[in-house]
Image: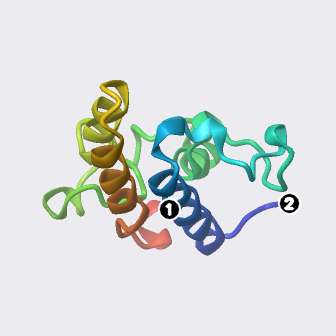
Amino acid sequence: MELTYKEIQELHKELWTWISKNPEHNFKGDWFRWKRNGGDIENCRINCFACDFMHKYFLCCAIKGCPIIWSPITSYKKAFCIPSIFSEYTDAGLKKEWKKAAILALKIANLPWREEKELL
């Protein structure tokens, strides 16, 4: 089933909110809703709804950037998840700093997205 841009955003938020409540998993692939984990959501590219959306149209995010606005400074440019709060989240997880990882994951869940028409 093809997801709408709004559904992709909602699933991104749900995934990262779940991670914020279960930071010790520290891996998007652990999400219970992925089909491979017995859930109802098709697996997507690198477990990232934003990347999966962009790859459907451009083969990579490098052409138009990520649909997520990782920083207000980069909201009008080709922005990417690395370096950003995502890098901080990854570092916290690698260091098993679960409280910090949970806070960062919730911030990622609530990041704004660019308008779909900007991307296509």
Residue on which the image places disc 2: 1
Q: Residue furthest top?
A: 94
Which residue is rendered at x = 23% and y = 62% of the image? 76
Residue 96 visible, this orientation: yes
Locate residue 96: give its quadrant: top left
Residue sitting nearer the eye, 89 or 4: 89
Which mark, by number, is residue 41? none
Percent across and percent down for residue 120 are 51, 61
Mark in the foreground, 2 or 1: 1
- The colour scheme is rainbow
Mark 2 vs mark 1, CA separation in Å: 23 Å
- Residue type at mark 2? Met
Percent across and percent down for residue 75 are 24, 62
Which residue is rendered at x = 37% and y = 33% of the image? 93
Residue sitting nearer the eye, 20 or 47: 20
Residue sitting nearer the eye, 16 or 69: 16
Q: Give the secondary structure at mark 1.
A: helix
- Residue type at mark 1? Thr
Which residue is rendered at x = 38% and y = 61% of the image? 106
Mark toward the start of the polypeptide (2 vs 1): 2
Locate residue 45: give its quadrant: top right
- Does residue 77 sit above or below 4 in this rendering? above
Percent across and percent down for residue 38 are 86, 45
Residue 120 visible, this orientation: no
User: Which image quarter is the N terminus in?
Assistant: bottom right
Neighbour class for label 1 at 10 Å: few (<14), some, many (≥20)? many
Residue on which the image places disc 1: 17
- Does residue 5 sit above or below 105 in this rendering? below
